[in-house]
Image (cartoon, rainbow, N blue to C red):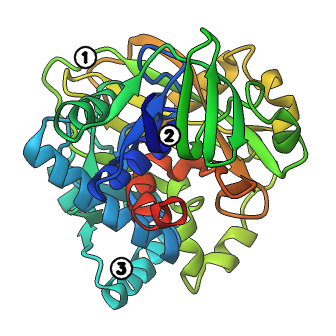
Amino acid sequence: MKKYDLLIIGGGVLGTFHAFHALEKGLRVAVLDKNSRPQGSSVQNFGQVVPSGMNAEWQRHGRKSLDIYKSIQAQFDISVRQNGSVYIASDAEEMTLLEELAAINRANDYPSQLLTARECLQRYEGLRADYCRGALFFPEEITLEPRVALYRILQFLAEQKGLDFFPKTLAIEVEQTGDGCRVTASDKQFFYADQVLVCSGYEFQSLYPDVYAQSDLQAVKLQMMLLERQPTQVIPGSILTGLSIRRYESFRDCPSYAAIKAKEEPDSLAKKWGVHILFKQTTDGSIIVGDSHEYADAADAETLRIETKGEINRFMLDEAAKIFDLQNWNLRESWNGMYTQCKTSDIFRHSIGDRIHLLTGIGGKGMTASAGFAFENIKKYT
């Protein structure tokens, strides 16, 4: 009978990077995932790694994540591209926030560069002159391909670091025994470990549904679209726009933020659907556009999964067309992404005894911050 130092339930980005750091410490680690390869929040997103949008604490984790992603990419291709991130202002208020954030970045020693409207138009093909007032560029930030990156990281850990990865393995029970834990899978396999970490994302029913139902966790549904390949147009890096400037946490530290937000129209469609417009071109030339945000308590998460709302997609495409003139607006596919977040804290942690630990609710920060967060958080379980 093989016994692990740490067994992780859930092969998303949060669980995977806890496995990564545990393996780096020389521990015996297993990851169980109910699917053949990860299917949840970690593959439903843009693939933008943007610490620039986060508050000071999580930006620190995100910056550490950048180092980790780049280090893995140097050893094993996980689709990382360092083309930077840019926040494009559409008006004088948003430009003020960019200038204030640039000053904060200098104080925090995080590289960023203010760009004039002319510089933006030269860098980003198809960017509309009637939209752009200027921008703030973050050269250290990266993109990756979410549908392949996480699976390749798991491959890297299995092939080179000694991870035992068990796909198509649904954990249905975790029991604490005298000297560790026993995990039962739906196929009646048993796994044994000193510590168990449950990183099950928005899956609230298989394990500990009562704990999640009584928490302040909420599920968030996002709508995203993939446009067909652009014949020759190349738009590098992560493109974040005016609504992102007005939404992201990092801008809340700007002196003008509160006054600018107070003047916004409370009944706008952007507010109603939690829309901000992002663009990211994939390696095949397609472009991901989004996104929107709808919310439900953890106990009611299933109410969000039913439909993709056409009116939201149409609104986002109309807004996107005000920002870029793309060569091809044909829609290849549309999908709902899901993640979980807490209403009153940055992440959900709950321990059952001293060996079973639940960890989820990292919100939209997962792809950016999980690697760096896990670097510090793994100490709690090892």
What's the residue at 47%, 34% (across, down)? 42
Tell me the SS state at disc 1: loop
What's the residue at 41%, 72% (across, down)? 60
**Can residue 129 be seen by looking at this rendering?**
no
Few, some or many C-alpha atoms within 10 Å of disc 1 (few <14, some 14-19, many ≥20)? many
**Can residue 259 be seen by looking at this rendering?**
yes
Few, some or many C-alpha atoms within 10 Å of disc 3 (few <14, some 14-19, many ≥20)? many
Please identify the quadrant where the N terminus is shown.
top left
**In the rendered image, the vertical position of residue 225 relative to residue 267, given as above or below:** above
Q: Which is nearer the N-term, disc 3 or disc 1? A: 3
Q: Which residue is mark 2?
A: 7
**In the rendered image, the vertical position of residue 312 relative to residue 101, given as above or below:** above
Q: Which disc number belongs to residue 135?
A: none
Q: Which disc number belongs to residue 102?
A: 3
**Where residue 196 sits in the image (x, y, percent)?**
58, 44
**Where residue 72 sits in the image (x, y, percent)?**
18, 47
